[in-house]
Image: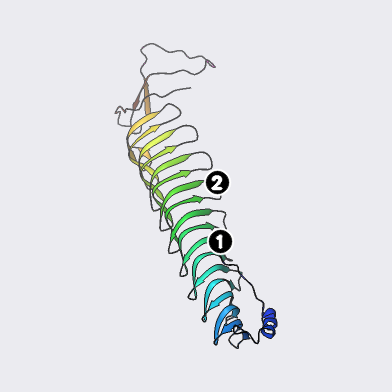
Amino acid sequence: RYVIKKISMENCYSLLKQNRENSNQVNVDQEGFCGQTKKGMRHGIGVYCYMNSFFKYEGDWFQGVKQGCGTFFMRDGSYYKGCFLNGEIHGRGERYWAHSKNLFVGLFDFGEINGEGVMKYGNGDMYEGTWLENKKEGNGKLRYADGSVYSGAFHLNKPHGEGRLMFSNGEEFIGEWVNGMRHGHGIYQYQDGSLYEGQWRCSQFHGEGIMNHSSGIYYNGLWINGRPLLEPCKMLFDEDEPLTIFQDSGPFSLSITCLTDEQAVTNECGRLLK
């Protein structure tokens, strides 16, 4: 495990005086490097300020390249601290972006976010899981700032495959996702106890599905763009005798027949009138 050692430019001059006889002596060159050298190469601990004054590196060097553990600073406040290999960001580290205030802790592969890691976004979201080429890929958990949580498969930064979304209000979807949308087969549990199970397209009910509503309405059939294909618009009471209902008499149930605009009988049943 590496420990990062920071060296200021003032410390470099102090170390230079103390290490004139050391083979790993501290030198200051005209290219902006201050630190230990060996056989004319940067080797050991050192600080390098880039010519454009935007970047600065503090940390380990090996035979002239950044290798080991160090911190790479940017003038806007962004930084990376962690492992380097052959001059590249490689291994476990921490990366912060000043503009977005995103913070990532995890694995890097020659500068790219690859493997396991946690990203805390500036907007309050947080993702923990696997990455590929700087994108969420594979299995992970995404916690949204509003309290909702998605856990499941990702592809190209979006939910894709099997996944579960728990909303902050207690509602829940379990099923298939495509490109960030509910698409395929899935179950949606509503806060009031209503439940839909069936096919989805672009996050809408679409295809064969069953809606068991908390009011007592039950629909089993085809859905188009979020609505039943045979949506009832009229109700016929199936009572032969006149019915008298008193105010404040409490809940009651009736046997009804539901009709569409074309007077066709639908298979919706079990409606509870209050």
Residue situated in front as seen by the camera: 186 or 69: 69
- Reply above or below: 236 against 21: above
* Magenta highlight: main SS: loop
Render colour scheme? rainbow
Q: Which residue is mark 1?
A: 102
Residue 105, percent from left and from top: 54, 60
Callout 2: SS: loop
* Residue numbers of the magenta segment: 238-251
Tag 1 near tag 2, CB within 8 Å? no
Q: Residue at x 52, y 57 (%)?
A: 118
Q: Which residue is mark 2?
A: 147
- Reply above or below: 121 against 67: above
Q: Residue at x 53, y 64 (%)?
A: 93
Residue 61, percent from left and from top: 55, 77
Callout 1: SS: strand
Q: Label 1 vs label 2: CA separation? A: 18 Å
Q: How many residues crowd mark 2 within 10 Å: few (<14), some (14–19), many (20+)? A: few
Circle 1: residue type: Asn
Residue 268, percent from left and from top: 35, 28
Question: Taking the image as drawn, is residue 61 in sight?
Answer: yes
Q: Is residue 223 left or right of residue 149?
A: left
